[in-house]
């Protein structure tokens, strides 16, 4: 429905999310790789950019199919681009324009600003400013420091704004997007989780037909929702494989497997713990551990997939942030695809076709889609858990005994969070087993045992994260419980590092 042309702004994905929140479908494409069917989109949004329209690094989109032909909303760089190359003028701003500002003037008879009043707070983030509007432009709004904060090109449905409506601090940003998309572009707000399920089920049936599909379940939200969608579409032709790599949480394999069976999925549980532990023997370096675990998984999965006769498709729970092509600004205006463990995750020797039913939706949408299909909220609200599991939370070499210790510690921590109503306040939590022995005293005896670190973070996508200020009483209780109940641990510490510069996992 809506095409977002990306010029590399850190906020581009946010634009897409706001549009989706209005129940309108949209896609992000790099400005220099627009989709072939761009004439089918009903409106276009031009994103911001870290680049300047002045100087050498200007990014030139081809707007010949767009301008004057359909409604356009140009944000920040987009607004400056239209100004600079259509008879206006852009110059460096005298004052740095970052952060909150208020619209001191609004041309109030414009549909564009309907239900938005003067004084409305907006978010600015730019170092250039539009000194002169382009030819045929009409001023729509100003702030104290930015005279040309919004304009419209006469004779076209082309609107441009210097501020960022997609950022939460732009209080009426969503209203503005709604005015543009619904009132001006006339787009219907019909893209809901139910409609997504309906159209995706239909399209899976069409592409897959009567073929067999294999899918690896992980216990996480994405693969589970993908499985239920596929199951709805093709029923028993979906073959799910759930591998126990021996690095899962305590009792996770048994409970999750039972839950999947309860959901009616055709799932095979494969306990390959021994094989994974063997592959990890003597491996201490984090990336080598990841490789060893990844390779073992591919082998196990491939063995299992070969047991399904005539399977032709591999389903994956890839979601939109994994596949959005990003504009690589530093490497020049070439489009690169972000590398990610899910993308291109198909080993050469498995010559299966890929079906990815969630590849156009965001994480929060995956949850909404799951809820609309009746998936247990408990499953949908699970914290993310890394593919290599406890393998990258046991620092140094992984052994069966260390896995046992960490599983116990992790269970005390996670169950405690749930019991105290803290689980949903945390984006991700877990425990790390450190390769350190420290001295303690228990009763009259000196102990020399392991140290564990607890980590709980707030985040939206894992790219940045902050440690969670868990109540001292909770930490105290948890520490006591761990030391008293988990043999081999005599010291508990809490990780108070944010990301960056630390990462969420310790390896
Ligand atoms: P970091 O440690 O990079 O983690 O701050 C960010 C998020 O990614 C998860 N993570 C992984 N997930 N395979 C995965 O599937 C991995 O190798 C991996 N490493 C980190 C981590 O749990 C956090 O959610």
Image: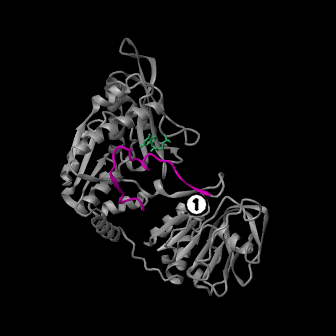
* Residue occupying the point 65% across, 69% down: 78
In the rendering, at what x and y percent does residue 407 appear?
Answer: 33, 32
Tell me: 346 left or right of 303: right
Q: How is the image coloured?
A: one colour
Decide if residue 76 is in sight here.
Answer: no
* Residue occupying the point 43% across, 31% down: 289
In the rendering, at what x and y percent does residue 389 appear?
Answer: 38, 37
In the rendering, at what x and y percent does residue 342 appear?
Answer: 42, 48
Magenta segment: 334-360
Tell me: 147 left or right of 497: right
Q: Is residue 387 above or below residue 336?
A: above
Q: Is residue 47 above or below residue 440?
A: below
- On the image, which quarter does residue 368 sit in? bottom left
Nearer to us in this view, 312 or 153 = 312
CB of mark 1 near ligand 1 (< 8 Å): no
* Count of marks, rendered view: 1
Name the main secondary structure of what is drawn in magenta: loop
Residue 344 shown in magenta: yes
Disc 1 target residue: 11
In the rendering, at what x and y percent does residue 339 appear?
Answer: 50, 48
* Residue occupying the point 38% across, 27% down: 280
For the residue labelled by badge 1, is the local secondary structure a helix, a strand or a loop?
loop
Nearer to us in this view, 14 or 301 = 301
């Amino acid at each position: 429905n809506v095409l977002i042309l990306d010029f590399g702004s850190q906020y581009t994905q946010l634009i897409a999310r706001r549009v989706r929140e209005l129940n309108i479908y949209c896609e992000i494409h790099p400005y220099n790789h627009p989709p072939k069917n761009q004439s089918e989109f009903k409106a276009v949004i031009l994103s911001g950019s870290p680049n300047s329209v002045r100087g050498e690094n200007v990014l030139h989109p081809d707007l010949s199919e767009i301008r004057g032909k359909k409604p356009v909303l140009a944000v920040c760089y987009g607004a400056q681009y239209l100004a600079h190359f259509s008879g206006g003028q852009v110059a460096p701003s005298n004052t740095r324009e970052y952060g909150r500002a208020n619209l001191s003037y609004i041309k109030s008879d414009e549909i564009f600003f309907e239900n938005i009043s003067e004084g409305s707070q907006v978010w600015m983030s730019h170092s250039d400013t539009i000194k002169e509007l382009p030819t045929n432009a009409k001023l729509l709004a100003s702030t104290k420091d930015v005279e040309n904060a919004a304009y419209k090109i006469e004779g076209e449905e082309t609107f441009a704004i210097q501020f960022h409506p997609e950022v939460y601090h732009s209080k009426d940003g969503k209203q503005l997007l709604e005015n543009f998309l619904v009132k001006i572009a006339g787009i219907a707000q019909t893209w809901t989780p139910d409609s997504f399920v309906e159209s995706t089920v239909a399209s899976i049936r069409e592409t897959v037909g009567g073929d067999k599909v294999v899918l690896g379940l992980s216990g996480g939200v994405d693969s589970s929702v993908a499985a239920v969608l596929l199951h709805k579409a093709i029923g028993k032709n979906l073959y799910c494989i759930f591998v126990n790599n021996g690095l899962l949480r305590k009792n996770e394999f048994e409970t999750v497997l039972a839950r999947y069976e309860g959901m009616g999925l055709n799932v095979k549980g494969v306990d390959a713990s021994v094989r994974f532990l063997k592959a990890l023997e003597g491996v201490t370096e984090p990336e080598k551990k990841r490789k060893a675990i990844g390779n073992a998984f591919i082998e196990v999965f491939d063995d299992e997939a070969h047991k399904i006769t005539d399977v032709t498709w591999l389903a994956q729970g890839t979601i939109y942030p994994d596949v959005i092509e990003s504009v690589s600004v530093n490497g020049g205006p070439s489009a690169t695809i972000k590398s990610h463990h899910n993308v291109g995750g198909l080993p050469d020797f498995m010559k299966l076709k890929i079906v990815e039913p969630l590849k156009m939706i965001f994480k929060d949408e995956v949850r909404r889609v799951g809820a609309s299909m009746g998936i247990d909220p408990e499953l949908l609200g699970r914290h993310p858990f890394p593919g290599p599991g406890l393998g990258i939370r046991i620092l140094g070499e992984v052994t069966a005994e260390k896995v046992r210790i960490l599983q116990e510690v992790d269970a005390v921590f996670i169950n405690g969070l749930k019991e105290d109503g803290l689980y949903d306040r945390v984006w991700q939590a877990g425990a790390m087993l450190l390769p350190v022995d420290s001295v303690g005293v228990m009763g009259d005896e000196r102990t020399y045992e392991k140290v564990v670190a607890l980590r709980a973070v707030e985040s939206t996508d894992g790219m940045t994260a902050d440690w969670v200020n868990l109540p001292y009483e909770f930490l105290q209780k948890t520490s006591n419980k761990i030391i008293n109940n988990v043999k081999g641990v005599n010291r508990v510490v809490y990780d108070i590092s944010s990301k960056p510069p630390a990462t969420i996992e310790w390896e």
